[in-house]
Image: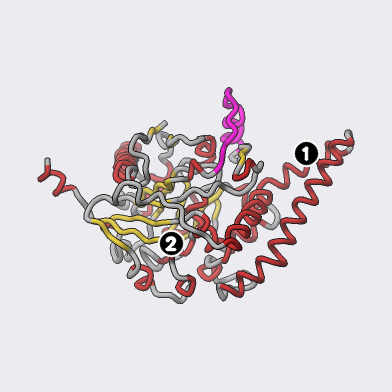
Amino acid sequence: QRQLRKTIAMKHYKLDCASLPDKLFTKGTDAKDWLSLATTTADKFPPGSLNKVLPIDRSVEIERITGIALWVIGNVALPFLTVLIVASFFSDIGMLILKLFLVYVATLIAVNRYYYAPKFVKKYNAPDQLSDTDIKGNQYLYTERNNQKYTSLQFVWPESIQRPALADKPAIFCAIPHGAMPIGITAYPMWSKLFNDKLCHWTCAPVVLKLPVISTYMRQVGYIPAKSKNIVEMLTKKEENVGIILDGVAGMFQNHDEIAYLKKRKGIVKIALRAGVPLVPVYGFGHTQLWNVVVDPFGILEKLSVKLDTSLCPFFGRFGWFLGPPHRVPVTICLGEPVNCPKIADPTSEDIEVYHNILLKKYEKLFEQHKEAYGWGDKELKFV
């Protein structure tokens, strides 16, 4: 058994993103400077070592409390506001709730735009406005830097994808679980620098890129619609990385459970085979703990959300705040060994099935590799 363990053991790297010096959080910083701060282990990290909440500056904490609350509202404001406006015509209570909602939103905007934005733009020497052309530069937002600190974010990856393993071709980073909001993936520069120099485009539901205000920001940091045509174009024509939350909307309805909706998620495998690019399994430890999701016992909201490809998922955050900021839970993004897909112009269903099964096994191995280090030795990853 010792000999077998020796054979299958693989070196792993860990980067404490939250503790990365602010002066290194720039587009101009060489990846070598980040990698020089990474620690390694010959096999597994010690139990509980990936589940540490780090101290945080109070101003960073309050900025994220108000900033994430505003971000959440930005994603749900249109349908929510529509309902309140209609209700205000028929009820005094509806009118009162509408006014309170508008005051709430206005307060969050004022606090973030006129106090915290100037403060952190100066602190991080970040651009005051996003560029229409420099997507890589846009990814170094002060808000995403503060996300890393708020979630005590760490990245863990195996030697098999350590530079320069992915240097010659783009990769598809397949992250699970979604949770209420997959906040761990918002460390955008990590995906565009740690493993190769290719810009990483994350995907989202097409409807999100039609929302006012929010859609402009998301496009400026590289988001594309989660459609085959857009993904293939990025991989083959632009030769850039793509990131996808593989369990999608269905993954939002898991409340403190590690259940992955992956058995039918085979489309991304077909895309990878057509493009001849590797699939990199990614697990966000802590994603399901950030918010308390309200799940109806009949699964009606989940079915509607999946059908409409948009979230109808109510949740509570820190302080019991409805649609508020997440709990201060450490998030550790663990990447697994890649599924190296050959280039097949027209993959058969058998081809897709083979590589999909390999991907599921890689996820299982990834979860087992790091669950004790996150303090989840008794948990199991289930596929549905």
| Residue drawn at x 51%, y 56% as measured from the top left | 186
Which amino acid does the dot numbered 2 rest on?
Cys
* The quadrant where residue 265 appears: top left
Q: Residues within 10 Å of mark 2 (few under 14, many from 20)?
A: many
Mark pair 1, 2: CA separation = 40 Å
Q: Which residue occupies 62% across, 49% down?
A: 208
292 to 324, vertically: above or below:
above
Relative to 256, say whether 30 is above or below. Answer: below
Quadrant the N terminus occupies: top left
**Residue 293 lies in magenta, yes or no?**
yes
The answer to whether residue 314 is above or below residue 324 is above
Q: Can the viewer see residue 341 in this picture?
A: no
In the displayed image of the protein, which residue is found farthest to the top?
298
At 57% from the left and 24% from the top, the residue drawn is 297
**In this rendering, position of residue 278 left or right of residue 320:** left
Please state, as top left, top right, bottom left or bottom right, where the C terminus lies in the image. Answer: top left
Task: Provide the residue span drawn in magenta.
Answer: 291-308
* Percent coordinates x, y for residue 47 in the rendering: 31, 46
Mark 1 lies on residue: 83
Q: Which mark is residue 3?
A: none
The spot of residue 331 in percent (x, y) is 45, 50
Element on which disc 2 rests = helix
- Residue farthest to the left? 3
Residue placed under numbered mark 2 in the picture: 17
Of the two numbered discs 1 and 2 in the rendering, the one whose residue sits closer to the viewer: 2
